[in-house]
Amino acid sequence: MTAQSAAPVSPDEQEALDTPELSAGARFRRRFRRQYPALLALGWLVLVVLTALCAPLLATHPPLEQNLAGVLQRPGQGGHLLGTDDLGRDVYTRALYAGRISLVAAAQAVAVAVALGVVPGLVAGYAGRRVDAVIMRITDGVMSFPPLILAIAFVGVLGPSLTNAMFVIGVIFAPRFVRLVRGSVLSVRQETFIEASRSIGTPTHRVIRRHVVPNVLSPLIVQISLAAAMAMLAEASLSFLGLGVQPPDASWGSMIERGFRYTAAAPWLTVFPGLLIALTVLAFNVLGDGLRDSLGREERRAA
């Protein structure tokens, strides 16, 4: 009589058995270091942030300096690394300073979305019933409108400015966070440790703070990374339409809008900021995928 073969062990379970002394954070760091595309994306984002912060040190010309005698110069011509625009301004310098505005705009939109979406999601998921129904119907109503059309309408009422545009984008993205947080709360609300904490009389706010919120943080971090990419694209779209950052300031989106008029004569005016937007958005998405894979494994193991 042969012994019954043991059930196969998944790589995640085998890793937990091989490294029982490591904490969850240490296992996450160990797994994330194996996500080479995510590490490359993180390196690019760090580089973009550092160059934006050090723009005054890296700039070769003042960002608003005009040279009407040297308009539309090619990259490398006249001491301009990426050429000049239609007013003779250095494209390289303006791209550095525009990166500041694009990153700040994405951060503003994500901050508004998190501020407006996390708390209602927690309340809807934990309270349930009528409260959940009311919050989710409001969320569904907001998500039923086309995001860009709704943003254009609000910016048209509030006035074209970067702050107004990013506030509207944050409001539009907030329902995504509401649904994400609500789903995460629903998945842990009936867990044994939640029931045990309730049975000993732990206040609701303490249960949420100590037991529910930590289980929401992992998917929330991933969603923040993905929302930053969408916010940067939304800012570029609104700035291209003239509803975002206003002259003389510039973002990568507004640089594309201005260079679009001279696509045939000076294609570099749209190519360089377009590449920066594409690479940065791709980096945010790849980083989000890497975080999801690393954090998701830890959540599945805990389950």
Image (cartoon, rainbow, N blue to C red):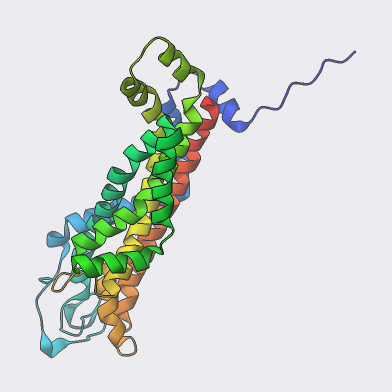
94 shown above or below 24: below
222 shown above or below 49: above
What is the x, y in percent for residue 147?
A: 38, 62
| Residue found at x 35% / y 39% | 120
Choose top left, top right, bottom left or bottom right for residue 14: top right
Choose top left, top right, bottom left or bottom right for residue 59: bottom left
What is the x, y in percent for residue 278?
A: 38, 65
Q: Nearer the viewer, residue 40 or 179?
A: 179
Residue with the most extreme front position: 130
Residue with the most extreme top position: 200
| Residue found at x 18% / y 64% | 97
What is the x, y in percent for residue 131?
A: 40, 36
Placement of the N terminus among the 4 image quadrants: top right
Choose top left, top right, bottom left or bottom right for residue 201: top left
| Residue found at x 33% / y 83% | 267
Can residue 287 be spotted in the picture?
no
Placement of the C terminus among the 4 image quadrants: top right
Q: Nearer the viewer, residue 292 or 206?
A: 206
Can residue 7 be spotted in the picture?
yes
1 shown above or below 100: above
| Residue found at x 27% / y 43% | 115
Q: Nearer the viewer, residue 104 or 279?
A: 104
Q: For the image shown, how many numbered marks are present on the structure?
A: 0
What is the x, y in percent for residue 36?
A: 46, 47
